Amino acid sequence: MKTQVGIIGGGPSGLLLSQLLHRKGIDTIVLERQSRDYVLSRIRAGVLERGFARLLHEAGVGDRMEQEGEAHTGFYLAQDDALLHVDLKKHSGTNVIVYGQTEVTRDLYAARDAMGGTVIHNAADVTPHDLQSDAPSLTYRIGDDTHRIGCDFVIGCDGFHGVSRKSIPADKMRLFERVYPFGWLGVLSRTPPVSDELIYARHDRGFALCSMRNRNLSRYYIQVALDEKVEDWSDDRFWAELKRRLPRAVADALVTGASIEKSIAPLRSFVAEPMRWGRLFLAGDAAHIVPPTGAKGLNSAGADIHYLYHALTRYYETGQMDGLDRYSETALARNWKTQRFSWWMTSLLHTFPEQGAFGQRIQQSDLAYLFSSEAALTSLAENYVGLPY
Ligand code: RFL
Ligand code: PHB
């Protein structure tokens, strides 16, 4: 088999790039290790930046998001019983859209199907070859049969645990990592959200977040220690702990119900530099991870895809490699700013085992400063709605 761009990973990054390139007449094949049902069962991001939404429109998959997604012009930060409003519209001039990653992925699959795009599921042992040559290839196995795809470029969109980043020699890469000493326990429930806007809560017992997918689907998270097990968290225990961390009025208004998904995600900051090795280009979680506090993971993946899409289109239209040559530097420059913001918002709102009394006071004054300074609020809003690309 032959294609122009071989894409490893059929998550949002890989599907979006495939869809965008197809509309420019550039041929792609997507290799995904899991089944489609499995990919669509993962509950992840909920908040989309305007830039990401624009990219979905450009890919021709923005209609359902526009109809069913909700524009949010602000969110709340809570501390004990205080609820502080962050007016995104006022401080940044724009808004974010609440529309689940699962729905984005579903829309992208539908669009790939409609255009006859090739997405190969259950592809085992995907392996890139000859990445330093002008003619790289990918092999993969389905059952007992091994297949080979020749291509011009390989794009690694296979997430943090994928094979792409690992195929770059260790001495050609520098890794930056911070693993946080806690995770998020998340619950999805068919209940009306407690608030029209998201609430990020700082509390001595740990961080809590009230989010949503739609008017009757809520997503809640609480910070838990890394050794906590989902099995030890009954729904009742989860709701009781969540309520303890929210302002009284919010806790009283919370509608609880049976969970339809419950999972623990560890929190990590991670960057791999550079994002390129010969004809292999990394994008999204394959190259970088942020803790979810700033709602930036999927959105940063979107920025990478934007840069790659334009660089690859330029190459196929003019034969110029300059966009691709600049990709790693351009994507990393934006990503490090997003890393800083995600780290800062995580540091502001979580309880750290070793922070001590001094650390607590610094955290409290960081919040106090935020709400006494238009400049600080503007900076928060500018980052939350997403830096330009
Ligand atoms: P994905 O989604 O991990 O997709 C990678 C795909 O590659 C496949 N794969 C392979 N395929 C072939 N061969 C291999 N060897 C392979 N290895 C892996 C996988 O099966 C998978 O289908 O990466 P991608 O596309 O880069 O997308 C990144 C986003 O998924 C991620 O950044 C976000 O979900 C992060 N995130 C959030 N981001 C936001 O922008 N806003 C949010 O509100 C937000 N909330 C979150 C989040 C992530 C969370 N978790 C669980 C980590 C909330 C949570 C709890
Ligand atoms: C979510 O709804 O899953 C969500 C929202 C905001 C975040 C992280 C996750 O910062």
Image (cartoon, helix red, strand yellow):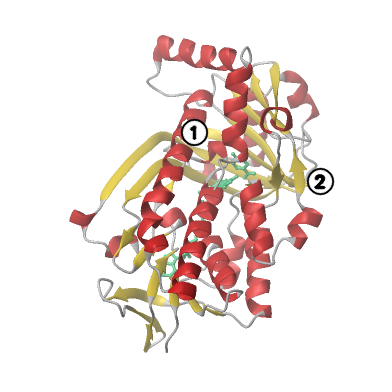
Point out the image quarter for the N terminus: bottom left
Q: Where residue 175 sits: x, y (%)?
A: 29, 47
Specify whether residue 221 is in view.
no
Quick check: is the Cβ at mark 2 less than 8 Å away from ligand 2? no
Instruction: Residue 273 in the image: state x and y as whole percent.
Output: 31, 50
Badge 1 amino acid: Phe
Separation (CA) of disc 2 from disc 1? 29 Å
Towards the viewer: 334 or 179: 334
Q: Please give the label number shown on residue 215.
A: 2
Mark 2 crowd level (few <14, some 14–19, many ≥20, 10 Å Cα):
few
Quarter of the rendering containing residue 267:
top left
Amino acid type at circle 2 is Arg
User: Image check: 334 left or right of 263?
Assistant: left
At 31% from the left edge and 80% from the top edge, which residue is drawn?
Answer: 135
Front label number (2 vs 1): 1
Circle 2: element type: loop
Q: What's the residue at 57%, 27% (across, down)?
A: 379
Q: Out of 245 and 107, give the one closest to the viewer.
A: 107
Mark on residue 341?
1
